[in-house]
Each structure stands twice: as structure tokens, then as C-alpha cells.
Amino acid sequence: MSVTVDVTARSLNKHAEYLCGDTTELLKTEDSDVIILADGMGSGVRASILSTLTAKILGTMFAGGATLEQCLSTIVNTLPIEKRRKVAYSTFTILQICSNGNAYLVNYDNPDCIFLRKGKPEHLPMRRRVIHDREVTECRFHVDTGDMLMLMSDGVTHAGVGTAKYAFGWPPEEITKFVETKFANGASSVRIATAMADRCRQIYGGINRDDTTVVVARIIQSEVVNLMTGPPRDMEDDPRIVADFMADPEAKKVVAGGTSATILSRELGRPLRASLDYFDPDIPPMAKMDGIDLVTEGILTLRKAVELLEQFKKEKEPDEAFFRELDRKNGASMIAKLLIEDCTDLNMFIGTAVNNAYQNPDLPIDLGIRQILVKRLIAAVRALGKRVNVRYY
């Protein structure tokens, strides 16, 4: 069975530093996901350069099939030398998860990876090796749907050092318990990573004494979303767009637009019922149809959904206010939440007929409002690392 990885990274800069000394690379090869977390020595510009070089070199070489020995040799011979201690220094963790479930974890001086199976901590039998006078640990294992792994820099374990409660930092067993509790609530990788970053910030008292990064990877089944919007240019294509949209019985189905919903209702012979729940005066109300997960208005709803997606990608640290917006019971928030948290593959079925009510007559047809929003939506979802397939009618 093929597995899919839902992964999110969150970082906090050291107090008063513009750049983060930690770097995360999330790469996709033909049959695997590769996650790299590098932590450069010190903080600020120097640490950022060290960690970026490390992550980029490891990512390029490892994804290209280089051995661990080759990767480490290149890192040792490439990084700048620290003058006082005469070492080229950046810690790193590499996690590769193949589509068949085989996983490979390598750690060099970062805190241990947290691994949850069936919601409970599971020990990973790490093996020690010495390569080019550097001691690393590695482990080959298998992951299943429902597993979760979390990588972290030492800014997490050092949180609160010197305070009355956490004199020696945030204990690993408490970190594991915190993650376990969040995971038990069914949270996505986005929510868990954000909660971890918020908790670290709280322990630091709002003044982060070190760069802090967490990377959360959940092993999930593929979550396909089919989104249909806009009527076809030719009415004879109505049956075809509906047939294609409904073809995958496992996909979650979203219809955005009154005309699209009417076409779907007619072709499927299913009644379209207006919802009596009206939660947001700025977003038009939704409707209901048997077998369709979400039926919304078109232009206004899509515009707000796109804005939320773009805001999420732009913000390095989405706060509680953003997630409250994402949890609102209106069509735009529900579309955005579905695409951010419950989607690995998005199939879009786009009708290209122009609705004159939303069309600026001074613009050519291909620059219609709906088409502009669709292009923004595609770009925003792809920027989140999702696969997007588009069909036009």
C-alpha cells in the first residue's frame, strides 16, 4: 500500500535576529519524501549560511542517490571553518520516507526524533556510526498509515534553560507527552507544528534564546479533493464535466458556484437544497446536495478562500487568530481548511463559460474574474506541496 506524507515545518528566530539559523528542506523524489533539518552554529547570518549550505548540499546529493558517506564528506569539506574551534559545524537530521513505507533516518547531533505509532511513543533502534571522524546515528524502519514523526532543533529542548521550572530545558519526556496529546486530538501536521512552536515561545517567555524549529510528518492515506467551478463553454459538455467530477467515489467533492451546482443537480437528478445556516454576512450561504461534501457560491467564496490560502503560505507562524478564521463555518473557510489540512491531491474541473455578471467588458475572456481566481488557487495549493491536476471544459 502506498503511503503519503503530510509534513509541516515551523521555525522561531532567536530574539532580535532577522534570519533563522535553522533551515528545513522538504523535497519530493519520484518515489519518496525527503525531509532535512539543519541547525547552523550560533545564530543570525552566520548560522543561517551554515544551515542553508548544509540543507541544500544534503538535499541535492541525497535526493540524487549519494551515500551518507559522500554527503557527510562533502559537508565537512565545504562548510566554512569556525576560527576558534577549527570546525565546520552544522548539525542535521535527514528523514526519507518512501512510498512503499520504508523509512531511513539519519541524525547528527540534533535532538532525537519523536515517533508515535497508534498515538503512543515508539522506540527507534538507532545505530551509531563514525564517518570522517563524525559520529552519526541512523535507523531503517517501516512506517504505516497513522504514524507520526517529529524532528526538532535544540532550540526546542533548550527552551526555558535557567528558569525555575525548566532549569535544564524542556525535558524530552514532556515534549513527547505534549505531542502525544495534540496528536490524540486528531490534529493535522499544521496544527501540531504550530502548537509546538507556540509552546516553545511560551516557555521562552516570548524571548527566544535560540533558533527553534519543529518538523512534523504524519503518514496518511492519499486525500483527494475534486473541485468543480464554472459552467462549460459548450452546454453539450455539461454531462462530461459532471461524469469526470463524480468518477472517483473516494474523492471529497466541492462545488463552487450556483450555475455549477444547478448543472450537477440536473445531471445527477439530485435536489439542491439551500442551507438555512448563515454564519457570515460577508460570505454567501451554502447549499446541500446528497453525495457532495460542500456546495458554495462561486466568485465571492473562492476569492476569500484564495486569500486564506495565500495568507497561510505567506505567514511563517500562523497564529490562533488565523486558525479561528479557518474553523469558521462559512464556505470560504471550509474550502481553505479542506485544502490546507485534508488534501494531498486536488483535481480541478473548470468550466470556461464567462459569467457576464462578474466580467469586466474591457478584459479578454481568458482574464475573467473566475479564471484569475482559479489560477491563484492553483498556485497557492501547489505552493503548499500538494499535487494539482486541472481540466478545462
Image (cartoon, helix red, strand yellow):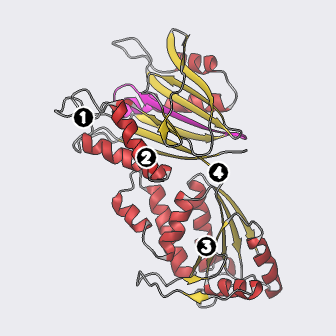
Q: Are marks 4 and 1 in contact (CB under 8 Å)?
A: no
Of labels 2 and 4, earlier in sequence is 2
| 212 w.r.t. 127: above or below | below
Q: Which residue lies at the image location 45% right of the left edge and 17% below the top edge?
A: 88
Q: Quadrant of the N terminus?
A: top right
Residue 379: quadrant of the picture = bottom right
Residue 387 in the image: x percent, y percent?
66, 55
Residue type at mark 4?
A: Gln
| Residue segment shown in magenta | 29-51
Query: What's the distance in space between the residues labelled 4 and 1, CA to CA?
Result: 37 Å
Return the residue at label 4.
221
Return the residue at label 1.
160
Q: Which residue lies at the image location 16% right of the left edge and 32% below the top edge?
A: 164
384 magenta-colored: no
Q: Which mark is residue 261?
A: none
Q: Which residue lies at the image location 49% right of the left edge and 43% below the top edge?
A: 119
Q: Of discs 3 and 1, which sits in the foreground? A: 3
Element under disc 4: loop
The answer to whether residue 236 shows anywhere in this view is yes
Query: What's the distance in space between the residues labelled 2 and 4, CA to CA?
Result: 20 Å
49 magenta-colored: yes
Query: What's the distance in space between the residues labelled 1 and 2, CA to CA?
Result: 19 Å
Residue 48: quadrant of the picture = top left
Q: Is residue 158 left or right of residue 31?
A: left
Q: Is residue 367 left or right of residue 80?
A: right
Q: Is residue 278 left or right of residue 7?
A: left
Residue type at mark 3?
A: Asp
Return the residue at label 2.
193
Query: What's the distance in space between the residues labelled 4 and 3, CA to CA?
Result: 19 Å
